[in-house]
Amino acid sequence: MSEDQNERPTMDVDKAFLKSKRGILKVAEMVTLLVAFVCFTVASTPKFIAATMLEFLITLLLVLLYTLKLNKRLTFFFWPLIDVFNSVFAAVYLIILSLMALTTFTVAGAVVGGIVGLMSAGLLCVDSYTIIKNITLNKPRSEIQNQDNQRINQLE
């Protein structure tokens, strides 16, 4: 056997992502989506259950993608843009879903699920804003850093 056959590819784990602002925001989204899912499950509203669980799974997959650094291996997608689209569409969908749950409630669990769903939509809006703010669109990195430095100097 050669040495190449004995070596196994290793998976890098990015623990710093989970400690970063975006990582904490993603985990907070997952927690609020799970709480909304549990509330809708207690209230027995299947359409709300499916939507919150689907978004929970998508967010979980994105967290795993960033934590395991798979976004650096799977380069055929621009992952930040996919994350922005997911956050924007999920926020709009959860706002509509939560307002429907709040207006047509039959059980207290639907009301709590609607409120937590609105909180989750707010977190998704903040997430999409922070990602859009960090995406560079056809600007060199040095130009963006100069703009950031100018903003900081204006604030001081």
Image (spheres, rainbow, N blue to C red):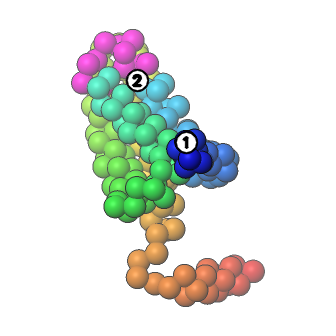
Q: Main secondary structure of the magenta part?
A: helix
Label drawn at residue 61: none
Q: Is residue 153 visible?
A: yes
Residue for badge 2: 37
Residue 98 visible in image: no
Residue 128, x across and y down, in percent? 44, 56
Q: In the image, what residue occupies the spot 26% across and 19% down? A: 46
Q: Quadrant of residue 93?
A: top left
In the image, which residues are magenta?
37-48
- Eyeballing the image, is 72 above or below 59? below
Identified at 48% across, 25% down, the residue is: 35
Mark 1 surroundings: few (<14), some (14-19) or many (≥20) residues within 10 A: few
Quadrant of the image occupied by residue 103: top left
Q: Secondary structure at mark 1?
A: loop
**Residue 46 on the magenta span:** yes
The residue at which mark 1 appears reads as 1
Q: Position of residue 27 (x, y in %)?
A: 55, 39
In this rendering, the answer to whether 112 lies above or below 143 is: above
Q: Amino acid at mark 2?
A: Phe
Give me the residue at 42% from left, 19% from top: 39
State the image coordinates of residue 136 (x, y, percent, origin top left).
Answer: 46, 75
On-image quarter of the N terminus: top right
Answer with the quarter of the image where residue 100 lies.
top left
Camera-side residue: 138 or 150? 138
State the separation of the CA atoms marked 2 and 1: 51 Å
